[in-house]
Amino acid sequence: MSSLKGVLFDGPLSTGKTMLAKAITNKCNANFISIKGPELLMMWFSESEANVHKFFYKACASAPCVMFFDKLDLITKSCGESRGDAGGASDHVLNQILT
């Protein structure tokens, strides 16, 4: 059986997802990297994807760590519904995160 690589917490606002992620981080003696969804989007095409790579590189360099994506729902709609945001930039960012 392989070790756990990730967990996705989903739920309404103010239900303790951030506190739970921080508690897990403290219990595992890991680093905590908090990323706000809107800070991933950049002005220039493909810069947003590069920004995602930067955060994952930072996470690998500081392993073990917990990457906490906060307010991701602000940039992720149903895939393909992101009209008017520079050619679906938020779709590209979400794809990079999932990859």
Image: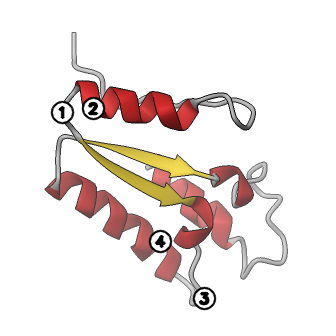
Label 2 environment density (alpha carbons within 10 Å; few <14, some 14–19, many ≥20): few
Q: CA distance from mark 3 to mark 2?
A: 35 Å
Q: Give residue 35's position: percent from left, percent from top.
A: 47, 58
Q: Nearer the viewer, residue 36 or 41?
A: 36
Looking at the image, tell me whether mark 1 or mark 3 is earlier in sequence order. Answer: 1
Label 4 environment density (alpha carbons within 10 Å; few <14, some 14–19, many ≥20): many
Against 71, residue 65 (above or below) is above
Q: CA distance from mark 3 to mark 4?
A: 11 Å
Residue type, numbered disc 4: Glu
Nearer mark to the viewer, of 4 and 1: 1
Residue designated by label 1: 29
Q: Tell me, for residue 49, which label it has, or none.
A: 4
Looking at the image, tell me whether mark 4 or mark 2 is earlier in sequence order. Answer: 2
Write down the quadrant of residue 52 in the picture: bottom left
Against 43, residue 53 (above or below) is above
Q: CA distance from mark 1 to mark 3?
A: 36 Å
Residue type, numbered disc 1: Asn
Q: Are marks 2 and 1 in contact (CB under 8 Å)?
A: yes
Residue designated by label 3: 43
Looking at the image, tell me whether mark 3 or mark 4 is earlier in sequence order. Answer: 3
Nearer mark to the viewer, of 4 and 2: 2
Q: Tell me, for residue 26, which label it has, or none.
A: 2
